[in-house]
Image (tube, rainbow, N blue to C red):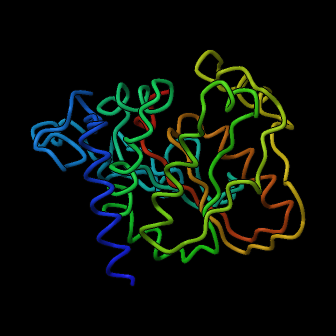
Amino acid sequence: MNKRKSAFKIVGEGVAQLLFPRRCPVCDRIVIPWGEKICLGCLKRLKLLESPWCMQCGKKLAAPGEYCRNCGPGRHSYTRGRSLYEYGSAAKSIYRFKYGGRQEYAAFFGEQIVEYLGDFIRAVQPDGLVPIPLHPRRRARRGYNQAELLAREIGARTGVPVYADWLLRVKNTIPLKQLSPKERQNNLKKAFKISGNDVKLKKVIIVDDIYTTGATIEEAAKILKQAGVGRIYFVALASAEARDEL
């Protein structure tokens, strides 16, 4: 029975790709060759974030060292985080994924996160993945939450449960790209809350698309700590160099 269901699933996915061809996360054209998640010629245009990186926030360092100027022991509510790509190489792709309705990019991005950050995720041994939520009005307008899509792809490949409705966004914040780092912190105050106390997790990984100043992750981590989570980590699709602020 399981083999039959698997065969039906493969056939169904094939038909879906014929009717709605998958778009390349880089060039946004129909993927070549057929059946792949990205054009093979485009793959090298996405630059993996390689060392040296900050041992806490995971941002790429301009020179070898342990921490960037914003990090260090006890500086954040989260323990550690990692990002997959250098922001500049993935910015246009993430923009379409986030605002352009390209939900299908999640399959490729989730696969890449597990391939390259899988050791980090497995070392953490999280009780759950917690995507950064959207405010209900923004989610209704967009139709989906890109962080949740990422978390579900990661969860499906690692077996880690996804808690998409545990952390809620109760304040419809101004888009952070329009604000200074200090304004981002003020903008995010009281932006999140926990939906209830029935979930008890000791160790979680927050999932988001971009790590910039870290204000969003920091505020979410504070709320999760108040809910009793002991250790908090994060993974993101991309971040810039530690000296840059987006």
Q: Position of residue 226 (x, y in %)?
A: 86, 60
Q: Position of residue 151 (x, y in %)?
A: 53, 55
Left or right: 104 as drawn, with respect to 209 = left
Residue 175 drawn above or below residue 2: above
Left or right: 108 as drawn, with respect to 38 = right
Residue 58 drawn above or below residue 4: above
Residue 35 drawn above or below residue 95: below
- The foreground one among 90 and 62 is 90
Residue 166 drawn above or below residue 191: below
Q: Position of residue 165 (x, y in %)?
A: 74, 54
Q: Position of residue 207 (x, y in %)?
A: 56, 52
- The foreground one among 150 and 45 is 150
Left or right: 223 as drawn, with respect to 242 = right
Quick one: which residue is furthest to the top in this view? 178
Question: Residue placed at 44% from the left, 56% from the top?
Answer: 66
Question: Residue placed at 69% from the left, 46% from the top?
Answer: 218
